[in-house]
Amino acid sequence: MNCLICKHGVYKPGKVTVKLERDSCIVLIKDVEAEVCDTCSNYLLSQATTRTVLAIAEDRFNNGTELEVIKLKAA
């Protein structure tokens, strides 16, 4: 599939770092499986991965974390 952003690249399997921010809290989740554009690095996450990433971030937001870096473990 052609990239939704740059329209030139093609998505290929890879890993990315996802940054989620709420108020003064930042959560970085590393090694997230994604489809990554080979031209502009835009990425798409599967629904299951998105649910996992959002659940992790929500937990950290609710625990008052200011900054956290997490390495996602493969399922």
Image (tube, helix red, strand yellow):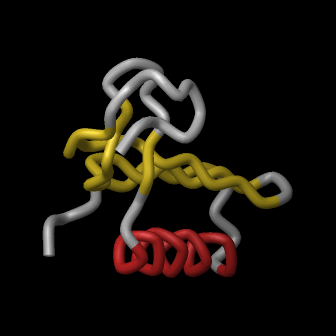
Residue 52 to residue 53: above or below: below
Quadrant in which the C terminus is drawn: bottom left
Front-lying residue, 26 or 5: 5
Residue that protrudes farthest toward the right in the picture: 23
Image coordinates of residue 22 in percent, x first then y, are 77, 60
**Residue 65: where, in percent of width, then height?**
63, 63
The number of numbered discs placed on residues in the rendered structure image is 0
Q: Is residue 58 left or right of residue 45?
A: right
Q: Position of residue 52 (x, y in %)?
A: 40, 77
Residue at the (50%, 81%) spot, across then down = 55
Q: Residue at x 81, y 52 (%)?
A: 24
Residue at 32% in and 39% down = 11
Quadrant for residue 9, please give it: top left
Quick check: 8 left or right of 27? left
Nearer to us in this view, 47 or 59: 47
Locate the N terminus by quadrant. top left
Position of 4 compared to 14: left or right? right
Residue 2, percent across and down?
41, 37
- 63 vs 72, nearest the viewer: 72
**Residue situated furthest left in the rendering:** 75
The residue nearer to you, when weighing 11 against 21, is 11
Q: Residue at x 48, y 35 (%)?
A: 42
